Amino acid sequence: MSSVLRPATPGQEPATADRQPVTADTYRPISSHLAITPPVSVVIPAMNEAENLPYVFKTLPDWIHEVVLVDGNSTDDTVEVARGLWPGVKVVGQRGKGKGDALITGFGACTGDIIVMVDADGSADGHEIVSYVSALVSGADFAKGSRFANGGGTDDMTPVRKFGNWALCTVVNRKFGARYTDLCYGYNAFWKHCLDKIDLDCTGFEIETLINIRVVKAGLRVQEIPSHEYLRIHGTSNLRAVRDGLRVLRVILRERSNRRALHGRSHSRVLGTSQEETS
């Protein structure tokens, strides 16, 4: 993997891994001391989120390569607001239904080497994207946001949802040899080439669980990123704890009963200071 995250000496340009100088159009400065070479695409699935988009976009770093907004047939001004907030935003119309379908549609429209998943309700802080990208360019294939890793948190989970997430996460860890601290969280990032190995095929909120399971089955390197989930700012979530929890459980059972080999499972690792390597 040739893309790198590299500190730069003030007044000098960052260099690639082989210490060759790069020009201004080959890297994206994050700060006066840090720059990256891979282009980053941010995918935002949205349906009637016009009121929340200003909060979402104001936290996105200006060094990202592109924003892909997947519009789920909104009846408000979601598309117009997005275009006004981020000139050049790539708007993709969703033909199907559900968050999973929207994300898969958005992934297909990305041109960046790194893809970041961000919800449109204002619950995710775009300033955290640098932590996800740092993990990827440092060697991880998949940077998984966690509200329960050391340093993470949530303002938007009821006790019932917390228990359900813990129970489902425990099942996935035991059945697939993962070491996750969070399962049903939509703030994640990965190298685009990973899509060739995880073959996504679901339409609803269970998409995050499917990604997490298939990442492990594919033997990809995972690093959890502590993340804080804020309350939805405006509107009501389409998430239904019981209904969608059952959908997640069905995905887990289906994946467990699927006899495809767990490619490289012995090499799948969850990295980070609070995580152990899987065996």
Image (cartoon, rainbow, N blue to C red):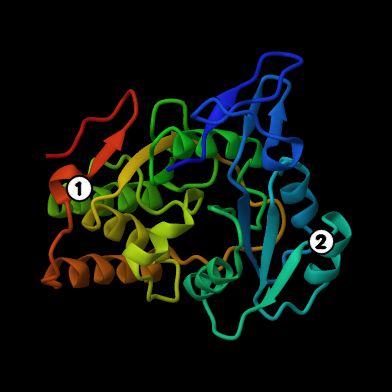
- Mark 1 Cα shell of 10 Å, populated few (<14), some (14-19), many (≥20): some
x and y, in percent, of residue 74 in the image: 73, 77
Question: Based on the displayed image, in which of its 4 quarters is residue 155 positioned?
Answer: top right
Residue reaching furthest to the top: 10
SS at mark 2?
loop
In the picture of the structure, the residue carrying the numbered disc 1 is 173
Q: Nearer the viewer, residue 217 or 96?
A: 217
Q: Nearer the viewer, residue 132 or 34?
A: 34
| 2 or 1: tag closer to the N-terminus | 2
- Can the viewer see residue 245 in this picture? no
Q: Give the amino acid type for the residue marked by disc 1 in the picture.
A: Asn
Horizontal arrangement in the rendering, residue 189 relative to residue 90 (left or right): left
x and y, in percent, of residue 249 in the image: 26, 66
Horizontal arrangement in the rendering, residue 12 relative to residue 246 (left or right): right
Q: CA distance from mark 2 to mark 1?
A: 41 Å
Q: What residue is drawn where x is 41% and y is 65%? A: 207
Q: What residue is drawn where x is 39% and y is 52%? A: 161
Figure check: 246 above or below 230: below
Horizontal arrangement in the rendering, residue 24 relative to residue 96 (left or right): right
Q: Give the amino acid type for the residue marked by disc 2 in the picture.
A: Gly
Q: What residue is drawn where x is 21% and y is 68%? A: 255
SS at mark 1?
helix
Q: What residue is drawn where x is 22% and y is 30%? A: 276
x and y, in percent, of residue 76 in the image: 80, 74
In the picture of the structure, the residue carrying the numbered disc 2 is 88
